[in-house]
Image (spheres, rainbow, N blue to C red):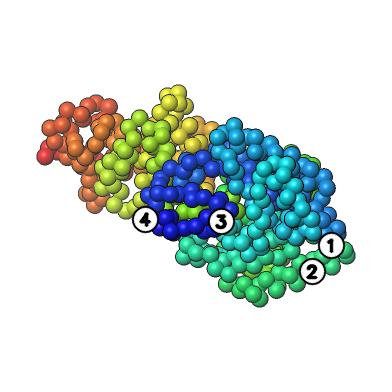
Amino acid sequence: MDGQSDQTAEDWGPFGRPLFADPQARALSRIGVVDVGSNSVRLVVFDGAARSPAYFYNEKILCGLGAGLAETGRLNPEGKARTIDALRRFQILAEGMGIAPLTAVATAAVRDAADGPEFRETVLRETGLALYVIDGEEEARLSAQGVLLGWPEADGLVCDIGGSSMELAEVHDGAVGRRLSSPLGPLKLQGFKGSKKALRGYIADVMQDLAARMGRDNKRIFLVGGSWRAIARIDMLRRSYPLTVLHEYRMSPADAKATVAYIAKADMAKLGNATSTSMARLSLVPLASEVLLQLLRTFKPREIAVSSYGIREGMLYQQMPARLRRRDPLIEACRFAEVKDARMPGFGRALYEFLLPVFPGFDKRHIRLMKAACLLHDVSWRAHPDFRHEVCFENATRANLGGLTHQERIFLGLALMHRYKNSRAGSRHSALFGLLDEAEIKSAERLGKAIRFGAMFAIDDPLSAGKLKLFPRKKVLQLALNTKGRGLFGEVASSRLASLASSLGATVSVVDV
C-alpha cells in the first residue's frame, strides 16, 4: 500500500478517498467514522498520531436497530427512527467540526434485514449519509485490523460480538488469516425459541462448528465489542481491580468463568450503577455471558485480552501504508505528544541517548518504555508544580496509548512520576503500584530519577556536555564532563545525580574529558 497513486476509489473502501496520501505521514487529519451496528450507533472522530490515533470526539447511542430481527426479519421500527435521528445529528456535528463527509459502515442488522436496502435509501435521503454495508467476513477482518492497530504483534483469535452476530478472525505476524461470521449476537439470541438448556445447546453446536472450521490452537483470544467490554467492567468490579482501563485488560479463563457466575447471581441495576453501564447494554450481558462461557469451553485459550479497538480503528488500519503500519503505535503517539506539548520538542531523543548507558541490563521491552518515557517527560510541564508528578502518572496510565499492557502503563507512569518527584510515598495512586513487582517498581524509579537528572543537566543536548556510564561491577556511576558540562554541572544537578546513583546502589565519579 505504499503506492497510493496507483489506487482507485474502490481500493480505499468505504472512505472513497485516501487518508494517508503521504507514506511518511505522522499526523492524521481529523476523520469521522460512523458504525451502524445492530445495537449501537456510534460516531468517532479520530485525530493525532496517524499510527496511534486519538479520539477527538466519541458518541454512542443504543438504538436497538436489530431488536426483534430474528422473529420479524425486519429492522426494529423504533430503532430505525432513533438511528436516523442519530445520523442526522452526527452529520450536523461533522459539519460543525469541518470533517464532512462522514464515512459510515453498517453491519449484521442492516445486511440481514429484508428492509435493509430500503433503510439505506431512507438514510441517504433524510441525512445525506451513504451507508456502506459490510458482510460478516469483512466485519471480522476490519475488527481484526483494529486489534492490529493497537497490538502490532497480536497473535491469536479476535472475537467481535455485536448485537446480531459474532465474528472470529485469526491474527498472526501482522496479518489477518481465516475469518468467520456466526449468528451468536445477543440481540439475535433473544429471539431463540426454546428452553435455557436448548439455547445453551444451540450456542455449543454453533461454537463447535466454528472451531471445526477455524481451529483450536489459538492460545489468546482478543475480545472486541460492547457486550464483552461490559463483562470486563464487571470482572474488574468483582476483582477490585485498581486500573479501570478496558484496553489491554487481561482475564484468565478462570476469572472470566467466575465473573459469568457472579453475573448470574447479581442485581443488574446495582451492577449498572457500580460499573456505569446502561441498562440497555446490561440487558444483553446474560446472553453474551453464555456465549463467552461456550467460547472458553470450545477454544480453551490460556489468556483473554480486551480490545477497545475494533471496526472503526480497523478502517483506519486498512488505509495505512505498509511503512506506517510497521511503526510502533506507542512511540508514534509519544512523538506526537512531544511535538505538540513539550517545551523543547526533539529533546526526548537526545535525553534517551544520553541515559542509555546507565541501563545496560534493560531488555528490548524496557528500552521501548524508556524511549516512551523520555519522549513524554516534559509534556505535562503546564501542570501546577505541586501536582505535576501525579498528572504525569495519570497521563501515562489513562491516556489513549496503544501497544501497552496495564503493567507497562504503571511502569511508564511511575518513571514519569519520579521524573518530577523523588518519593512516591503518600501518592493517591498507590493502589496501582501493586500491579508491579518490587523489581519493576525499582527499575521505574531508577529510570525516573535518571530522567530527572538528565532533563535539567542540559537544555538542548546532554551529550554535547558530558557522558554517563554505569560500571555495575565496580558500582560506580561515572559522569565525564567537557568544558561546557563543567559549567552546567551545578548544585541541583549534582544532587540529582547523587539521588540517581543511590537508587542504583552506586557511588558517583565525576571526571574531566
Of tags 1 and 3, the one toward the viewer is 3
Please report whichever mark, 2 or 3, sits nearer to the chain's N-terminal start: 3
Q: Name the residue under label 1.
A: 192
Determine the CA span between mark 3 and mark 4: 37 Å
Asked which secondary structure carries label 4, the reply is helix
Pointer 2 and pointer 1: residues touching (CB < 8 Å)?
A: yes
Of tags 4 and 1, the one toward the viewer is 1
> Badge 3: few (under 14), some or many (20 or more) residues near its Cα, within 10 Å?
some
Residue type at the position of mark 4: Lys
Please report whichever mark, 2 or 1, sits nearer to the chain's N-terminal start: 1
Of tags 2 and 1, the one toward the viewer is 1
Residue 380, horizontal then vertical, whole percent:
43, 31
Identify the residue at the far right of this view.
194
Q: Mark 2 points at which residue?
A: 202
Residue 446, horizontal then vertical, whole percent:
36, 42
Pointer 2 and pointer 3: residues touching (CB < 8 Å)?
A: no
Of tags 2 and 3, the one toward the viewer is 3
Asked which secondary structure carries label 3, the reply is helix
Task: Please say whether residue 43 is visible from this viewpoint.
Answer: yes
Residue type at the position of mark 1: Phe
Q: Which mark is residue 13?
A: 3
Q: In this view, does 433 lie to the left or right of 450?
A: right
Asked which secondary structure carries label 1, the reply is loop
Q: Mark 4 points at which residue?
A: 364
Please report whichever mark, 2 or 4, sits nearer to the chain's N-terminal start: 2
